Amino acid sequence: MQKVVAVLGGGIGGLSACHHLSKSPNVSKIVLLERSGRCGGWLSSIRRDDGAVFEQGPRGVRPAGAVGRNTLNMVSELGLESEILPVTKDHVASKNRFLYVKGQLHKMPSGPGGVVRTIPPFSRPIIQSILKEILIRKGTEEDESVHAFVSRRLGSENCIPQYHLGHWKRLEMMRQYISNHNLPLTLTGASYDGVSVNDVIFSGRTAAEGLIGKT
């Protein structure tokens, strides 16, 4: 019997799930529910009047490993091969990276000299933080977040906000509840598993296959 499947959230994980669900003959209808006025989640582009394009959120993928191949396969299935812009290690985009902090762009170090000099927005050389890290003792928290770990060992300037403490426990409780009550639900996306675009796209495929089998 064919199924009607609802996907909550039109981020990259939800869109990936929709794509794989659409290939199944066991699915008669897919309903995508997105509270905002656009799909894509963290992925978005802003084009200024002068033609400059700013990518927000993830702006590229690494085609390595099984999850990388999965992304490239989906791109091929969608007929988007011509939209790929390959960036090699010697490309100018690989050598010039910037952080946008407090209204200003700061170029990140691209060579050995950059780690021994103080480069804004950092208040001390990166090598100093790395050497200091060796002397830091092990944390006492049972479930220390990535943000807490990096800020404790390398300083608050070398880290970005991450999940709250105990996030994994909440996920376990949610998944256990779904399993215990035999609910036709699954969790996917950056809020639950993985942080890279490849991980999230692969989790969307896994979620779809968990509901209707492999496509």
Image (spheres, grey):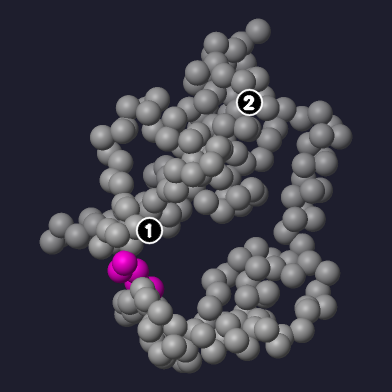
Q: Is residue 76 left or right of residue 23?
A: left
Whole-number angstrom distance, CA of label 2 to CA of label 1: 29 Å
What element does badge 2 sit on? helix
Residue 17 visible in the current orientation: yes
Q: Which mark is residue 209?
A: 2
What element does badge 1 sit on? strand
- At label 1, which amino acid type do we have? Gln
| Front residue (pair 80, 41) | 80
Residue 43 percent coordinates (x, y): 41, 51
| Front residue (pair 86, 12) | 86
Q: Farthest top residue?
A: 1
Residue 78 percent coordinates (x, y): 37, 27
Where is mark 1, residue-wise?
56
> The N terminus appears in which quarter of the rendering?
top right
**Range of residues picked out in magenta:** 95-99
Query: 152 above or below 164?
Result: below
Residue 59 percent coordinates (x, y): 38, 53
Q: Residue at x 65, y 68 (%)?
A: 146
Does residue 63 belong to the magenta stretch?
A: no
- At label 2, which amino acid type do we have? Glu
Q: Residue at x 54, y 71 (%)?
A: 160
